[in-house]
Amino acid sequence: MDYGLMYDKIQNELQTTNTTLVAVSKTKPNEAIMNLYAQGQRIFGENRVQELVEKCEALPKDIEWHLIGHLQTNKVKYIAPFVQMIHSVDSLKLLKEINKQAAKNERTIDCLLQMHIADEMTKFGMNESEVIDLLNSTEFKNMQNIRIAGVMGMATFTDDKSQVRNEFRQLTSIFNQLKRDFFADDVAFREISMGMSGDYQIAVEEGSTMVRIGSLLFGTRT
Ligand SMILES: *Cc1c(COP(=O)(O)O)cnc(C)c1O
């Protein structure tokens, strides 16, 4: 398969809806990233801190790195100097640490609130009452070095397309509710990160502004 052609095809599809592509390069070598870079891609997503740090050091400085996987509090310090967006914020404790490490680096880090929408116990994310508690907390209100840019979620891994669609719809509805109740005047709160290789078209139909695509662009992971 020619992944270069696949990249063009996906970018063309996404352009009509102004959807941002995060190319998920986890486990893939730097050469694979540079192939897409040569075609113009600048936003790449990784799910492991160490791999992200190594790739950032080795690759061009105008790449925007997104952390998309679960993040342990004690590892925030390694990515705080350069990470552009963290998609996987699932607790106040983690957000506090991101804010602290961002301040140390004199930066503001964009964060997405990861919501649990899947019908699976294994996937990370907050429920609606947890996210509301977080946003109402005094600690959150005092944070100066993070910017909440929206929400993120992963649908259940299933062939049932209507279930996937319902879960994405649920995430869009949570986004709208949070926008209304907490971020009405905040233009930074605008992203709905949802959709992967197997379900990104449904996600876009349901309001995704940012899709995270790996295997369709780079081949399946071994
Ligand atoms: C791996 C991963 C993706 C991309 O998955 P593909 O099915 O390869 O497109 C997207 N989001 C997260 C959080 C991931 O860990």
Image (spheres, rainbow, N blue to C red):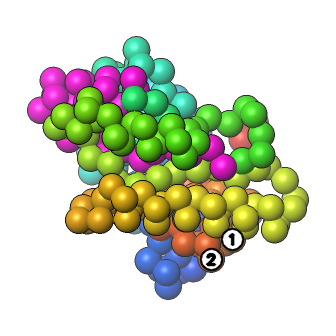
CA gap between label 2 and label 1 equals 5 Å
Nearest the camera: 165 or 183? 183
Residue 116, horizontal then vertical, whole percent: 62, 44
Q: What residue appears at the point 19 percent right and 34 percent down from the top-left corner? A: 142
Q: What residue appears at the point 55 percent right and 65 percent down from the top-left corner? A: 173
Residue 123: in magenta span: no
Residue 106: in magenta span: yes
Residue 191, horizontal then vertical, whole percent: 42, 61
Q: What residue appears at the point 58 percent right and 42 percent down from the top-left corner? A: 127
Is residue 194 among the parts visible in the rendering? Answer: yes
State yes or no: discs 2 and 1 in contact (Cβ < 8 Å).
yes
Judged left or right of residue 203, residue 34 is left
Task: Point out the stretch of residues depicted in magenta.
Answer: 93-117
Judged left or right of residue 198, residue 131 is left
Figure quadrant of the C terminus:
top right
Residue 86, horizontal then vertical, whole percent: 40, 41
Amino acid type, residue under disc 1 in the picture: Ile
Q: Residue 13: which quarter of the image?
A: bottom right
Q: Residue 40: which quarter of the image?
A: bottom left
Figure quadrant of the N terminus:
bottom right
Q: Name the residue under label 2.
A: 205
Judged left or right of residue 157, residue 205 is left
Q: Residue 198: which quarter of the image?
A: bottom right
Nearest the camera: 32 or 171? 171
Instruction: Classify 10 Å Cα crowding around label 2: few (below 14), some (14-19), many (20 and above).
Output: few
Q: Residue 202 carries which label?
A: 1
